[in-house]
Every structure is written in structure tokens, then in C-alpha cells.
Image: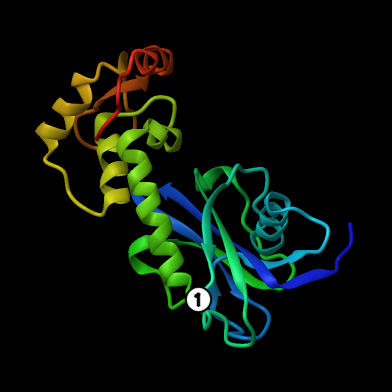
Amino acid sequence: MSKQIIEPLSVDCVIFGFEDGFLKVLLYKRFMHPCYGMWALPGGFIRFDENLDDASSRILEERTGVKGIFMEQLGAFGDVNRYPVRRVITVVYYALVKPGQYSIYPGRESLEAQWFPIMSIPETPFDHPVIIERALLRLRSQVKYKPIGFNLLPDKFPLLDLQELYEAIYGIRFDKPNFRRKIMKMNLLIPLDEKKKGVAHRSPRLYRFDRKRYASLTEKGFIFEV
């Protein structure tokens, strides 16, 4: 593949992860100018003979070591002054993953790579704060009507972990009884004869998301809503 790049066009990746009760975003520390040493979204210029999807996968791996994930295209950002050196339009991709499933390490043109809680992101360059906010709004919109949040939980989980996941994504607190009542009313969770181990207090019951039932209900017009 040719390494000739199309300088006016770049790709940036917003990778969200849920870990230890926090919604996090993956950043890398820049090893190039402008903004050398700043934490930024994994991004870079697109090569002349590669498509957008291939470019996003390559750049994410080169900056952070993360590979093999499906990313959805969020949109294009083309403010005239978004990049200080020249006019650059960027196409943004985003994904939601389990951080523990991926090895993070700095690649080419990267000093470090690290997960940051969404509420304590360091200063980022260019229009990256705007991009992150736009991706977060898209994520919140999706998890409200699609059960994609279950992909971030273990196969077996207590209801409290499910509530903490949605609280982390939305950045708000839910009333515990109301949240559980709403979730259980959907009849999409299979109660298991197992309890969570290794907790100091009373061990909570474990559940499993019923994907077959969800698929069947969706065909009949069911709408998932949290």
C-alpha cells in the first residue's frame, strides 16, 4: 500500500470503554507538531490509496495498539480553523468496547496511550472536545433505544452493575427502584441461580441478557427504551 497521504483529509477515532464503573475514552499523547505532547484522539492523515474504514483501523492501531474493532462513522468535521497549520477536514469514527479486552501501547508517532474517565479528560487539541461531545451525544442516543450497553457487561451481571453502566453513560443518577422496575418490565433479563462472588455485603443475584427474546420482540415492533 502506498504511504502517500492526502493532507487535507484525516480520520479521528473516539473509542469509549466502560471499566470500574466509569465511562472512559481512549487518548494518545502526540509525538508530532503541532500540539506535541498533548493528549488527543487517535487520528492521522488518510493515505492516497486507502478507503476511510481501512484508514481508521490503521490509524487507531498505530496510535494505541488497539485493533480488530468495529467502528461506526460519526460524521465529518470541517471548521475552517479547526487545524492550525492548514485546512484539514476530518472524518470521525467511534466505538464502544470493553477496555480489558485490548492491549494498549504507544505506536508510531505516539508517546503514550491511555484510558481516561470521561469526566476527567485532560486538555485536548484542535476541535477534539467538540468531537468527543458529539460522539457522547450519539452514544447516549443509541443506548437509549438499543441494548448495546449489555455488550460492555460480563455474560452474567447483577442489576447494580447494569444501573452503574447507564449512569456512567448518561452522567446522571437513576432512582434504584424505578430503574430496576423499568428494566424488569421489559422481560429481557434471565434470572440465574447464581450470586456475585467476592463482595463484602449481601451477594446480589446474577442475570443474563436474553438476546433471542430481544430479537423476537424487535420483529414484533418492540422498542427498547431506558
SS label for mark 1: loop
In x, y percent, where is residue 62?
Answer: 72, 61
Q: Which residue lies furthest to the right in this view?
A: 2
The image shows residue 162, relative to residue 213, as above or below, that is below
Task: Using the image as rendered, state which of residue 23 and residue 134 is in the foreground.
Answer: 134
- According to the picture, the residue beneath numbered tag 1 turns out to be 79
Near mark 1 (Cα within 10 A), the count class, few <14, some 14-19 or many ≥20, is few
In x, y percent, where is residue 176?
Answer: 13, 37
**Residue at position x 45%, y 34% in the image:** 151
Relative to 2, 60 lies left or right: left
The color scheme shown is rainbow
Specify whether residue 20 is in view.
no
Relative to 39, 108 lies left or right: right
Quadrant (top left/top right/bottom left/bottom right) for the N terminus: bottom right
**Residue at position x 18%, y 20% in the image:** 185
**Residue at position x 81%, y 63% in the image:** 48
**Residue at position x 34%, y 14% in the image:** 217
Quadrant (top left/top right/bottom left/bottom right) for the C terminus: top left
Task: Using the image as rendered, state which of residue 145 and residue 188 is in the foreground.
Answer: 145
